[in-house]
Amino acid sequence: MSTSLRDSRYRALGGAVALLIGLALLTFVLPDASDSLSRQRRVRDQAKQLKQQQDDRLKSLQTDASKLERGQATLAALEARLPQGSAGDLQWKLSKALHELAAKDNVRLSTIKYSPATKEGDLDAVEVEFTALGIYAPLRAYLRSLESSGLPFAVRDARLEESPEGARLTIVLRAFKPRDGAKAEEEA
């Protein structure tokens, strides 16, 4: 019997040691593993957030690049449509286009005044002031035709007034053409 009591004591002592080792593992190792696991989760979440931010930034940059490409294409198309030649050629082309559009929309042009060409960067700008006479509906159609004509100009001012003939539309345009010698400066 003494051997079985002794064996029981060793087993109890071995169980107590195993229990102490288990408690030590629970006290020291598991919290460390738990902290390590939570750090890994935090790092993973931060990496996902950073990746999402980078994806959003990439989409934003791609959108900006697309806008720039469209802008460059529009600018190239506009530059290709700019009339070549002298300021007098530009005035002649504008006068011809203004009169053709006026005839098409049943509007009468009374005066056209041209200012001398001024330099604006690589372009020469010519200011054109003219008065169109008619009733409101044809004047509106004329203004729409003028805006959609594709001519290289910007409307600087437009005034609509009543007159004995119906209505008077005074328009000031700024027409543009490449400056003589601007391409030579670019190539140099």
Image (tube, grey):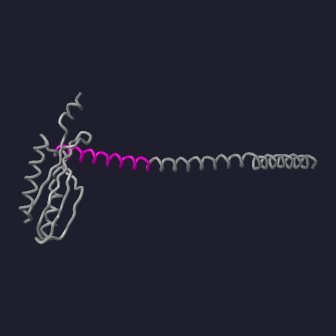
The quadrant where residue 101 appears: bottom left
Q: Count of labels shown? A: 0
Closest to the observer, 140 or 56 = 140
Closest to the observer, 63 or 140 = 140
- Prevailing secondary structure of the magenta residues: helix
Q: Image quadrant for the C terminus?
A: top left
Can you give x and y, in whole percent of width and height, for residue 103 in the image? Answer: 5, 61
Closest to the observer, 36 or 20 = 36
The quadrant where residue 185 appears: top left
Residue 9 relative to residue 47: left or right: right
| Range drawn in magenta | 56-80
Residue at (17% x, 62% y) in the render: 144
Residue 161 relative to residue 37: left or right: left
Q: Is residue 78 magenta?
A: yes
Closest to the observer, 66 or 161 = 161
Q: Is residue 100 magenta?
A: no
The quadrant where residue 161 appears: bottom left
